[in-house]
Image (tube, rainbow, N blue to C red):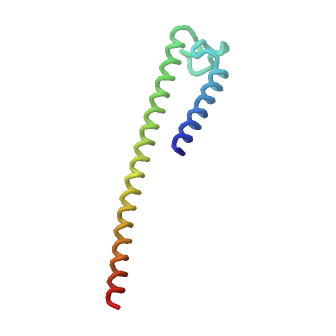
Amino acid sequence: MSRFLLKSNLRRCIVSQIRYSSDQLGELGKGAGKGGGGGGSIREAGGAFGKREAAEEERYFRQKEKEQMEMLRKHHKEEIEHHKKEIERLQKEIDRHKGKIRRLTHDD
């Protein structure tokens, strides 16, 4: 349940950021002073090359975000495995101590 809430909150946050940035930038690649903003001589010139450059940048950042999310998933999976192993180790310790208690009560 908490994972679902976290995902929905993350989506809401990302969508609001995308909407905000798209409102601020206008149409990407239109050139400086035309809503496309600065970002280098090609993008400032506008036209087809500016739009292509903007699309390439967007693709690059989407790919980076995808890689980061995959790394985060991998990290969390590794953490889960670590904690499962720790639980198993502690359960064995509990069983060992229970055995000692049984032997002590049996000796009485």
Seen from this angle, which residue lies furthest top? 47
Number of callouts in the render? 0
Q: Is residue 16 left or right of residue 108?
A: right
Left/right placement of residue 83 relative to residue 103 reads: right
- The vertical placement of 83 against 76, above or below, is below
- Image-quadrant location for residue 22: top right
Q: Which is more toward the observer, 75 or 25?
A: 75
Residue 70, given in percent of the width and then of the height, sits at: 42, 38
Quadrant in which the C terminus appears:
bottom left
* Left or right relative to 41: residue 101: left
Q: Is residue 102 above or below residue 13?
A: below
- Residue name at image x 66 percent, y 21 percent: 23
Residue ID at (67%, 14%)? 33
Towards the viewer: 98 or 65: 98
Question: Measured along the vertical axis of the image, is residue 73 above or below residue 58?
Answer: below
From the top left corner, tell me how far across and down residue 15 is, in percent: 59, 28
User: Which residue lies at the image location 49% right of the left edge and 14% below the top edge?
Assistant: 52
Identify which residue, 17 or 6, lies in the foreground. 6
Residue for point 46% across, 26% down: 60
Q: Where is residue 31 drawn, in percent x and y?
A: 61, 13
Q: Is residue 88 above or below residue 49?
A: below
> x, y (%) of residue 76?
44, 47
